[in-house]
Amino acid sequence: MSTTEDHRDPEAVRQFVEHLAMTFANLGFNRMAARVLGVLMAAEEDGLTAGEIGERLGVSPAAVSGAVRYLITTGLVQKSPVPNSRSDLYRLPNDEWYVAGAVKSGMYRSIADIVEEGVQAVGDDESNAAHRLREMRDFFLFIQEEMLGVLEKWQAGKGRSLR
């Protein structure tokens, strides 16, 4: 009987992780966080310790520390203690983390709230700055609402391949 490990190409997995990290970094994402995310996505295990992540990336557990803090903050990674150990296990949430992370955390709403501060700060409702800021605020409120609908549609059609 073959196992998943029999079918894995470690070099191809490493290249995937680095390609994902480069792509995410080009979009403004923290590169080490993207590398950690790639390792967790490609891991057969339910989760990995900082030491295991570091080993797969060829970096120290300390280098992994800031990246996992960032990923936890964004809702893309969860942390749980390893029983009888001082280590923590880092894993992807069980739900559709790539959509749910941003939607459930209220990230878009938070951005809109911050931009509202800018609207209030510039004061003049007729100014170019106020117009730009209101437009930005409204866009992020719109995205927050739309993403809720996208998440519902995704969950309703889950299991159906789009390729």
Image (tube, rainbow, N blue to C red):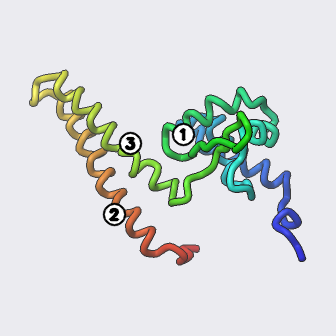
Callout 1, which amino acid? Answer: Ile
**Vertical placement of 1 versus 40: above or below?**
below
| Residue found at x 71% / y 26% | 62
Position of 138 with respect to 84 (left or right) is left
Mark 3 to mark 2 CA distance (whole Å) = 16 Å
Q: Position of residue 146 (x, y in %)?
A: 32, 58
Q: Which comes before the other along the chain, label 3 or label 1?
A: 1
Q: Which residue is mark 2?
A: 149
Q: Nearer the viewer, residue 158 or 1?
A: 1
Q: Which residue is mark 3?
A: 107
Position of 110 with respect to 27 (left or right) is left
**Vertical placement of 66 versus 137: above or below?**
above
Q: Nearer the viewer, residue 17 or 19?
A: 17
Q: Which comes before the other along the chain, label 3 or label 2?
A: 3
Callout 3, which amino acid? Answer: Met
Q: Which residue is mark 1?
A: 72
**Vertical placement of 151 versus 51: above or below?**
below
Secondary structure beneath label 1: helix
The quarter of the picture where residue 138 lies is top left
Q: Are marks 3 and 1 in contact (CB under 8 Å)?
A: no
